[in-house]
Amino acid sequence: LIENGEITEPLREGNLIGNGPQVLRDIDLLGNDFAMGNPGTCGKDGQGVPVGDGQPTLRVTAMTIGGTAA
């Protein structure tokens, strides 16, 4: 949780609420720390496809996040 520009406490059971394309438009800073997550497999009926994800640290100017204090 960020209050008055300071990180105060973590959230649990968080939900990101909003419109995906709008959130992408609201990104105003990107870090130079791109990293890939752990690869995995997505599958159905015995068939599997390798999957992965990655992104740099980023800042979004406006986003609604709901959750409870940890």
Image (tube, grey):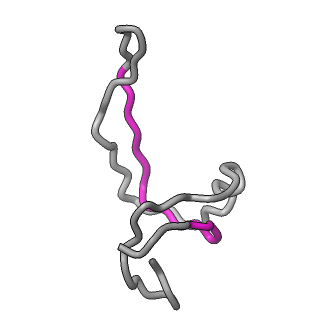
Identified at 41% across, 70% down, the residue is 11
Give, as a single range, the part of the protein colored magenta. Answer: 50-65
- The verdict on residue 14 being magenta is no
User: On screen, 3 above or below 69?
Assistant: below
Give 19 or 25, whichever is nearer the viewer: 19
Identified at 44% across, 62% down, the residue is 31
Q: Quadrant of residue 9?
A: bottom left
Give 52 or 47, whichever is nearer the viewer: 47
Left or right, residue 48 beside residue 28: left
Q: Indicate the quadrant containing the N terminus: top left, top right, bottom left or bottom right.
A: bottom left
User: On screen, 54 above or below 50?
Assistant: below
Left or right, residue 42 beside residue 59: left
Identified at 47% across, 62% down, the residue is 14
Q: In which quarter of the image is residue 26?
A: bottom right
Report x, y in % for residue 32. 40, 59
Report x, y in % for residue 36. 33, 43
